Image (spheres, helix red, strand yellow):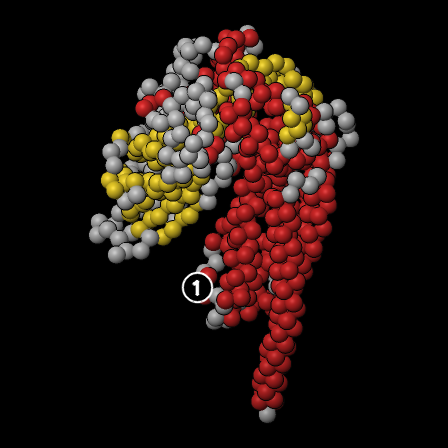
Amino acid sequence: MDVRRAVRRSLIGAAVLVAAAGAWLVVRGALAVGETVALKAAAEEFEATLDVADADAASAASFLDRMSGDAGALAGHALTLASLTSDPVWRAAEVLPFAGAQLRAARLGAAELARLTTAGHEVLVASSAVLRPSRSDGLDVDAIRALTPPLDDLVAALGEARTTLDRIDRGELLSPVAKGIDTLDAMIDRTGPALEAMRATARVVPPLLGADEPRLILLMLQNPAELRAAGGITGTFVAIRAEDGVMTLAGQADSSVFPPTEAPDITIPADASTRADDGVGRFVQNIAATPDFPLSAEIAAAWWRGHTGEDADAVVALDPLVLKPLLALTGPVTVDGEQIWAEQVVDTLLRRPYLEREQDAQTAFFRVVTETVFTAALATPAEAPGMAFHLAPLLDAGRLAVWSAHPAEQAVLADTAAAGLAARMEQRRAHALLFDDLTGGKLDAYLAASMTLETTSCRPDGRETTVVSAELSSAVQTGMTLPWTSFPAFGGFDREDIGLRLTALALPGAVVEAVTIDGEPVPWTAATVVGRPGAATRVVLPPGGTATVAFRFVADPGPENPDLVHTPLVGDPPIHVLEGVCR
């Protein structure tokens, strides 16, 4: 009888424990659901802050205040959720069929988010010293250096979070749980590259700005009104001296001081550009005809050394669209009696000068505007961190590239979008579209484009077919008055035509199958550029004209998320990445 009573009591006790554990899980689950709802709202607010920052040139300090508040709310809910989902009862229940997968995914997602938000908070605390500098004569390079340790921790946390989330089988999850994990994945994908670039910046910028010794930075100004593969023709150089965070203008030169000649001590690889006669190392205007930015930078540094006797410690390439966020922060500037606002950059610098000014005056105007904007920016160093924040997206768009003559710094830059178009192709394992102007005119400021990358896996041999295409249109109006000096129409084009060589580059191992314009086959030439197989064809757009150019490649299966990069145009073209349908 005592044995029976003991067994009965044990069973009753076990039932009570199971019931209690179940009740505990129900309560914790209900609380976790509440925190998840609050967390989702906080995440949406955080995303909204990032969107405002992308579109608004508000001061970096005010952005930091908004971001700190949003991140604090996000971190609070994440830590609470992690606490609710990490106790022994919760973990024990993860062995249950079906329900266990939901519980495990919730615990892992909450833990990773808590770790990320905690590490992110440390970065924000360190950032406050950079965005609210104590000195008025320059940047606080020590404060920038102090960002490196918390950024290292945050980037490491991002890597660990990616690994953890990849191990979760989404197919076992209920829709709300799966959506929560997908949302966290999307946040990591959106913020990760920017934070990795920020870490590289914290490492490179202090020495670049003369924290250890004076540095000479050579700005190479490109003009996308006449396109080259990596941007536009190069007509103006501006030198900036940097010492302990203080920057001053040190000199300038136009393309006219660099007569056509081979760049000294620079070997130009045979696959540097689409054609061997592109003059990458012979004509200073064609420095950007190669997507290999380190090569372009070394050529620029060599020419500058030959002209001035000075060695550039760094070369920075930028196009006029970089001036837009700078003007939004500094306010309008006045040059030649003309007030220039951020919203007017394209019309003021890339269109009207070629219709209204003589050739030498165009280059001079472009140079003076650039110098005036940078002088205004350098006069307010407290705004420099804010400028850096708003310039960051331009790196990924290819409008800003940086090279250092110091190997340790260049090794850091080489892994970022700042390394130029060829580097971004490799980092993303991306296809590319390169645009080169053939007319000698400045009508590419009127070029509009929409690009598509479509991949299908329908072939019986298992290989993929990838089509890289661009829908192009000209906004040039029939009958526009075009001065002969500005629009010479070299190459047999009419003066109102936009004439281009369009080159598509595929992933290594691909084979070109066909090139078409508006669906009709056209002549093309093979073009291996920076080791990538590709094809090039000639495109003519008369005033108001349109054309759809398509390049079809066949290759072994590529990355799961194919990507496309391109020459930065005057406008930012939409890019569509599609999965094709087998027919």
Q: Quadrant of the C terminus?
A: bottom left
Residue reaching furthest to the bottom: 1
Q: Is residue 9 positioned above or below 565 on the image?
A: below
Picture quadrant of residue 567: top left
Question: Residue at 46% across / 34% down in the picture?
Answer: 446
Question: Residue at 50% across / 38% down in the picture?
Answer: 571
Question: Residue at 52% across / 8% down in the picture?
Answer: 307
Q: Is residue 271 positioned above or below 580 on the image?
A: above
Q: Secondary structure beneath disc 1?
A: helix
Whether residue 465 sits left or right of residue 101 in the image: it is left
Q: Is residue 182 positioned above or below 569 on the image?
A: below
Q: Is residue 540 visible?
A: yes
Q: Position of residue 541 (x, y in %)?
A: 36, 35
Residue reaching furthest to the left: 460
Q: Is residue 203 visible?
A: no
Q: Position of residue 203 (x, y in %)?
A: 60, 30
Q: Residues within 10 Å of mark 1 (few under 14, many from 20)?
A: few
Judging by the rendered image, the residue that carries numbered circle 1 is 171
Q: Which residue is at the front of the view, 149 or 40?
A: 40
Q: Position of residue 138 (x, y in %)?
A: 72, 25
Whether residue 461 sits left or right of residue 113 in the image: it is left
Q: Which residue is at the front of the view, 120 or 314?
A: 314
Q: Quadrant of the N terminus?
A: bottom right
Q: Which residue is at the front of the view, 284 or 107?
A: 284
